[in-house]
Image (cartoon, rainbow, N blue to C red):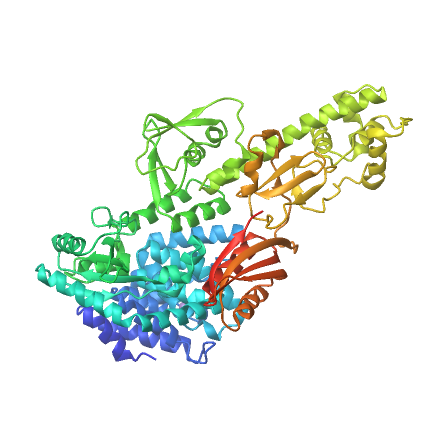
């Protein structure tokens, strides 16, 4: 546990003017307040706030922040009161401790609505004084480091919250060091096996490539020295979590990620950065498209550096970051670096208020005032945490901020839901452009509208904002309902005509109680959807009506109505959970690599066979390109958490060595996947092609298996096979 003198020493080292007496009082105060309390690890509780304070002294934060860290758990967990802390330590420290106490009560992984609301509170608290966030992050970091002592369920929740909220927030504030450690600790908790596999392979790799790393480093230093540049060159450590994320996101194998060497070059000034870049590019060929100048255009979190990739002395790819010591500080400590004591002029309570990271926070907090629902706000903000933004303008100059990757459709919905729903085209910077074009910073976007339009359901996959997605879903539901109602009306008109009975809305209205429906529309769309049968409606309106005819459609209606019943209401569920298809049609999945929930799907109607469901990326669909009538818009009809399995197929290339197949089977078994069939073909002495038919719950489940297979040393390549 950190001793009292050590705490004072640590602060005095970077801030000689710090109030020593107050630091001492805080130490004693926390010590007395926490008394004999213990942590789950068995350590005295007070060790925790002291460790948190120690982490913050590494960031060289002002004494008020350090003291607030020492006191951060006192009000919640001990007899201490805010009044007392205000009295002893003054209002500045008091309000920091108060902010931290309020944050303690927030549960950010609870139900969606509460989560959104809590996230809103979190952002409000940290926007009031960024130092609250810094203490909170250090608090979380220490808790993550000591997570092993918690019960497993709690461990998971804390790790998820860390990965969802705190790590991205640290990243957004540019505090790379803390973000990296939080991510890796959470990754280790959530996927211990994947973490272990990757860590082990990384250390093998470091071992094997030691010679080469040294060679590149020496060579870099020599070239720079010859060019008159005084530089510090160091190899960059790869982190397990970032490797894992790339494997997941880019679907590449470990090997493809690992033959890249990373180095950092630190030079004295900005001029030297560009000189060093010139020297490197002269010595080795650069890889096109990889050069980024974050010095002239810094990232949103204030990160600055030159990035480039070159082909090194032994034809390997070498990634370089070139920066000054100041940029290095910002890269590691982000917004906290703005508070570093240099000339004593920094006002810590306005910490980083000039920086872009801080401006982002302010903007986000301003958005809170617009009164979105908490869920929407959460989705919106989470997206923003992960992506940088693009800023676009309406023709009248109104600024619309969107997450990167947003399209003109997102833009339209951001302006107004009605604008989105009636959009038919866009003018981007004065020229007509497709609505699904990705927007760039500074684009001026004019949405072309037409009345009576409805957004096509396919738009849902073309948007990046939660607002647009929700609006499209709503509009689609409404329009599908209208279509079904129209169809239902046609069916009923014909049915009544056949029965020789008059059909009108008034008559239908009178029969609503008997039909157990609340509105005419409800009846019409139920009939259109196949949930209710025309014969039942005729009998509902004319209870005395008897259908004398036998055979044909009506007979079938009778047969079904005995199952569904007039008041039975519910649809007869398909054996295959797909919506959008007449329940009478036979339906099946395309064999050999079919769709699983989460895939975007399409139905193909063929005469005599019914409907076959394909994943939208399926090659087989090309055969129906010229036959648009056979394409049916379908959707999954499955509840989250429904434990149904669906067949899918993977093709693997595995290395011929004892135990390879066992490793593969183990991964699938560990993930609760069912192997239905395995076939193998030995291609060469070294490799075997393996085809695995397995059944999974959904796409996420399948992807988790694929990612983990990719991490296995015995597996060279994994692809999903689509019908
Ligand atoms: Mn704490």
Which of the pair 522/428 is nearer the observer? 428
Q: Is residue 458 left or right of residue 215?
A: right
Residue at 74%, 22% (x, y): give it.
Answer: 505
Where does the image place residue 444, in percent across and percent down from the top left?
33, 31
Which of the pair 435/685 is nearer the observer? 685
The image quadrant of residue 87 is bottom left
Q: Is residue 38 above or below residue 381?
A: below
Residue at 24%, 53% (x, y): give it.
Answer: 308
In the picture, the quarter occupied by the N terminus is bottom left
Residue at 28%, 62% (x, y): give it.
Answer: 262
Which of the pair 361/175 is nearer the observer? 175
The image quadrant of residue 38 is bottom left
Q: Is residue 659 left or right of residue 402?
A: right
Where does the image place residue 704, in percent across and percent down from the top left?
52, 59
Label count reads 0
Residue 421 visible in the displayed image = yes
Q: Is residue 91 above or below residue 595?
A: below
Residue 99 visible in the displayed image = no
Q: Is residue 491 left or right of residue 698?
A: right
Where does the image place residue 23, in percent across and percent down from the top left?
27, 72
Residue at 73%, 44% (x, y): give it.
Answer: 573
Q: Is residue 215 left or right of residue 117?
A: left
Ligand 1's quadrant is: bottom left
Where does the image place residue 211, in percent across and percent down from the top left?
26, 72
Q: Is residue 623 above or below residue 36?
A: above
């Amino acid at each position: 546990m950190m001793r009292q003198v050590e705490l004072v020493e640590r602060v005095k080292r970077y801030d000689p003017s710090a109030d020593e007496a107050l630091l001492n009082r805080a130490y004693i105060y926390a010590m007395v307040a926490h008394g004999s309390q213990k942590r789950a690890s068995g350590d005295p509780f007070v060790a925790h706030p002291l460790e948190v304070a120690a982490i913050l002294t590494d960031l060289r934060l002002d004494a008020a922040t350090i003291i607030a860290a020492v006191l951060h758990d006192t009000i919640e967990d001990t007899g201490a009161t805010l009044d007392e802390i205000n009295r002893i330590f003054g209002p500045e420290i008091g309000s920091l401790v108060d902010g931290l106490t309020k944050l303690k009560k927030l549960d950010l992984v609870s139900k969606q609505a509460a989560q959104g609301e809590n996230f809103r509170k979190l952002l409000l608290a940290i926007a009031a004084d960024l130092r609250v966030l810094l203490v909170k992050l250090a608090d979380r970091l220490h808790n993550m480091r000591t997570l092993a002592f918690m019960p497993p369920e709690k461990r998971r929740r804390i790790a998820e919250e860390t990965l969802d909220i705190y790590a991205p927030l640290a990243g957004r504030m540019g505090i790379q060091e803390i973000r990296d450690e939080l991510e890796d600790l959470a990754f280790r908790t959530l996927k211990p096996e994947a973490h272990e596999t990757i860590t082990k392979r990384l250390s093998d790799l470091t071992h094997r490539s030691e010679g080469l790393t040294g060679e590149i480093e020496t060579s870099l230093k020599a070239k720079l020295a010859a060019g008159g540049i005084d530089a510090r060159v160091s190899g960059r450590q790869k982190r397990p979590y970032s490797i894992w994320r790339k494997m997941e996101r880019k679907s590449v194998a470990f090997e493809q990620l690992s033959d890249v060497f990373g180095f950092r070059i630190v030079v004295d000034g900005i001029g030297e950065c560009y000189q060093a870049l010139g020297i490197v590019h002269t010595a080795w060929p650069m890889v096109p498209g990889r050069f980024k100048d974050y010095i002239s255009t810094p990232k949103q979190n204030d990160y600055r550096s030159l990035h480039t990739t070159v082909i090194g002395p032994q034809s390997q790819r070498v990634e370089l970051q070139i920066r000054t010591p100041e940029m290095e500080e910002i890269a590691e400590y982000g917004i906290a670096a703005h508070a570093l004591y240099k000339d004593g002029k920094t006002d810590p309570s306005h910490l980083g208020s000039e920086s872009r990271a801080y401006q982002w926070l302010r903007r986000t907090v301003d958005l809170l005032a617009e009164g979105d629902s908490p869920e929407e706000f959460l989705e919106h903000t989470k997206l923003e945490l992960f992506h940088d933004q693009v800023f676009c303008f309406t023709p009248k100059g109104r600024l619309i901020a969107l997450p990167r990757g947003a399209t003109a459709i997102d833009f339209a919905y951001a302006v107004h839901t009605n604008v989105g729903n009636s959009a038919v085209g866009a003018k981007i910077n004065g020229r007509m452009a497709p609505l699904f074009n990705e927007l760039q910073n500074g684009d001026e976007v004019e949405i072309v509208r037409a009345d009576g339009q409805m957004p096509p359901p396919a738009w849902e996959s073309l948007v990046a904002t939660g607002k647009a997605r929700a609006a499209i879903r709503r509009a689609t539901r409404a329009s599908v309902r209208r279509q079904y109602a129209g169809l239902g009306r046609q069916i009923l008109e014909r049915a009544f005509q056949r029965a020789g009975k008059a059909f009108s809305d008034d008559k239908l209205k009178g029969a609503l109680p008997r039909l157990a429906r609340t509105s005419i529309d409800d009846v019409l769309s139920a009939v259109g959807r196949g949930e209710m049968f025309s014969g039942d409606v005729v009998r509902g309106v004319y209870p005395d009506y008897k259908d004398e005819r036998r055979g044909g459609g009506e007979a079938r209606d009778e047969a079904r109505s005995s199952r569904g019943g007039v008041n039975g209401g519910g649809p007869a569920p398909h054996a295959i959970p797909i919506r959008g298809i007449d329940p009478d049609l036979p339906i099946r999945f395309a064999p050999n690599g079919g769709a699983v929930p989460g895939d975007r799907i399409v139905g193909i109607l063929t005469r005599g066979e019914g409907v076959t469901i394909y994943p939208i990326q399926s090659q087989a669909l090309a055969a129906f390109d010229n036959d648009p009538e056979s394409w049916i818009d379908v959707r999954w009809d499955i509840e989250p958490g429904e434990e149904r399995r669906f067949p899918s197929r993977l093709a693997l290339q595995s290395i011929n060595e004892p135990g390879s197949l066992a490793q593969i089977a183990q991964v699938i078994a560990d993930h609760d996947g069912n192997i239905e069939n395995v076939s193998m073909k030995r291609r060469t002495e070294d490799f075997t092609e393996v085809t695995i038919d397995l059944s999974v719950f959904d796409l996420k489940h399948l992807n988790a298996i694929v990612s983990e297979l990719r991490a296995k040393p015995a597996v060279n390549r994994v692809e999903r096979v689509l019908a």
